[in-house]
């Protein structure tokens, strides 16, 4: 078993004025792929490095497979790590790079050769085993780094933004390959990224971090569909979630958006008479060139053809919104379009705290 239990982990930056991780607790099941997601400086890499033993916490604990590893050195934790940089030996062939960790562990030569060949076949590196890294592409060098990590049969695999140095197309291709490899291995994996597309596509669970804390933990669809607060909704998604100041009438039947009104969906009846912050995803807004009952008027600001969709930036009573229209939808800046909101996809937040509100 290689479950990970992190309890009340605190790490303070030098100087003691700001916490890199602020009382973080996290449970990762055996074989689970967990993604630590957040902007630069949120504490995700610091948390990963403490799991690895490369940094020590000020307080709190870390256990792997029921064993307390909080203050153990990295070589006593039985884990492997893939870094953002490829970190391969430029003067050594691929074969040596993949087997380096096994050699340091004094594994017999025939066993090293068997495992190197297995990893090379898994990562499609077989034809390149006798090449130097200089003769490989960036994607192939990153495969070498992953192969070097998985041959170690470690309990836990740690990855610190391993795809960030690849170009967009290669990153997309390697991402799906990496997910299949980790699924086949069944290794407990912790993956750090600032790319929310990577997080949603790779993770069994996603921990969204902000200012040293976990803002939300859940499976990818929950984090996307029901953000815990405005920060998560604004960070997850491309485009991010739209937020609108709205007021619910005293009888709960009408929703007021600036000078416009529409019928309040049933989820808003619990907030009768309250000013709320309304969250809605771009794909959950229907865009029409003619008005239907309950639609809201909007002025087109920007039109961005994206191929499969057309992304519109529109304005509703002074509030900019991103909405998605079909690729065949024809409009232009300064024109009026009509927006229909899908009731069951609306999310309601407190205006002051920006935290999600639950209907009673």
Image (cartoon, helix red, strand yellow):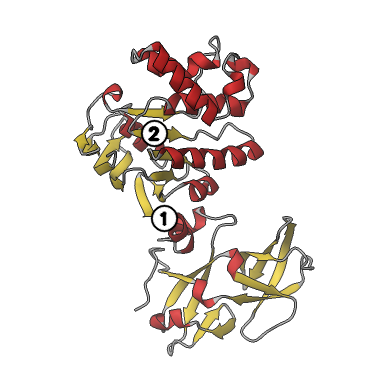
Quarter of the view holding residue 137:
top right
Say if 183 sits above or below 148 in the image. below
Q: Which residue is the site of mark 2?
A: 157
Secondary structure, mark 2, is strand
Q: Is residue 13 visible?
A: no
Secondary structure, mark 1, is loop
Measuring from the top left, give residue 124's x and y in whole percent.
Answer: 58, 29
Screen quadrant of the C terminus: bottom left
Screen quadrant of the N terminus: top left
Q: Return the residue nearer the eye: 341 or 211.
A: 341
Say if 48 sits above or below 272 in the image. above
Q: Is residue 172 visible?
A: yes
Q: Return the residue nearer the eye: 254 or 180.
A: 180
Residue 31 is left or right of residue 10, and the answer is right
CA gap, disc 2 and disc 1: 19 Å
Q: Which residue shows up at 45% across the image and 20% down it?
A: 114
Q: Which residue shows up at 40% across the image and 61% down it?
A: 228
Q: Which residue is the site of mark 1?
A: 219
Circles 2 and 1, Cβ within 8 Å, touching? The answer is no
Residue 49 is left or right of residue 324, and the answer is left
Q: Which mark is residue 360?
A: none
Q: Residues within 10 Å of mark 1 (few under 14, many from 20)?
A: some
Quarter of the view holding residue 71:
top left
How many numbered badges does the structure rendering display? 2
Q: Which residue shows up at 52% across the image and 31% down it?
A: 122
Say if 60 sits above or below 124 in the image. below
Measuring from the top left, give residue 239's x and y in whole percent.
Answer: 59, 57
Say if 315 sits above or below 27 in the image. below
Quarter of the view holding residue 259:
bottom right
**Earlier sequence position, callout 2 versus callout 1:** 2
């Amino acid at each position: 078993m290689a479950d990970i239990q992190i309890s009340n982990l605190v790490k303070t930056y030098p100087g003691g004025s700001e916490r890199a991780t602020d009382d973080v607790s996290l449970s990762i099941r055996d074989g689970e792929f967990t993604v630590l997601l957040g902007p630069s400086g949120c504490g995700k890499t610091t948390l990963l490095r403490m799991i690895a033993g490369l940094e020590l916490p000020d307080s709190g604990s870390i256990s792997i497979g029921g064993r307390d590893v909080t203050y153990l050195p990295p070589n006593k934790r039985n884990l492997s790590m893939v870094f953002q940089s490829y970190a391969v030996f430029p003067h050594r062939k691929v074969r040596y790079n993949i087997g380096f960790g096994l050699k340091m562990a004094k594994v017999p030569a025939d066993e090293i050769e068997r495992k190197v060949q297995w990893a090379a076949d898994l990562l499609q590196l077989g034809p390149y085993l006798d090449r130097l890294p200089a003769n490989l592409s960036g994607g192939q060098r990153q495969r070498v780094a992953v192969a070097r990590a998985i041959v170690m049969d470690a309990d836990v695999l740690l990855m610190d933004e391993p795809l960030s140095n690849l170009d967009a197309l290669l990153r997309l291709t390697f991402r799906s390959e990496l997910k299949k490899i980790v699924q086949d291995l069944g290794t407990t994996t912790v993956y750090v990224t600032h790319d929310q597309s990577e997080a949603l596509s790779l993770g069994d669970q996603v921990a969204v971090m902000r200012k040293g804390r976990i803002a939300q933990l859940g499976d990818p669809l929950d984090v996307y569909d029901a953000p815990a607060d405005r920060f998560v909704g604004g960070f997850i998604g491309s485009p991010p979630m739209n937020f609108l100041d709205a007021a619910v009438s005293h009888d709960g039947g009408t929703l007021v958006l600036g000078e416009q009104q529409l019928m309040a969906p049933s989820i808003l009846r619990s907030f009768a008479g309250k000013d709320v912050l309304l969250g809605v995803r771009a794909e959950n807004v229907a865009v029409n060139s003619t008005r239907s009952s309950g639609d809201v008027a909007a002025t087109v600001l920007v039109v961005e053809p994206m191929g499969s969709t057309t992304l519109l930036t529109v304005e509703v009573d002074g509030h900019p919104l991103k909405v998605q229209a079909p690729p065949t939808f024809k409009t232009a800046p300064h024109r009026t379009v009509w927006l229909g909101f899908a009731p069951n996809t609306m999310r309601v937040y407190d205006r002051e705290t920006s935290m999600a509100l639950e209907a009673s």
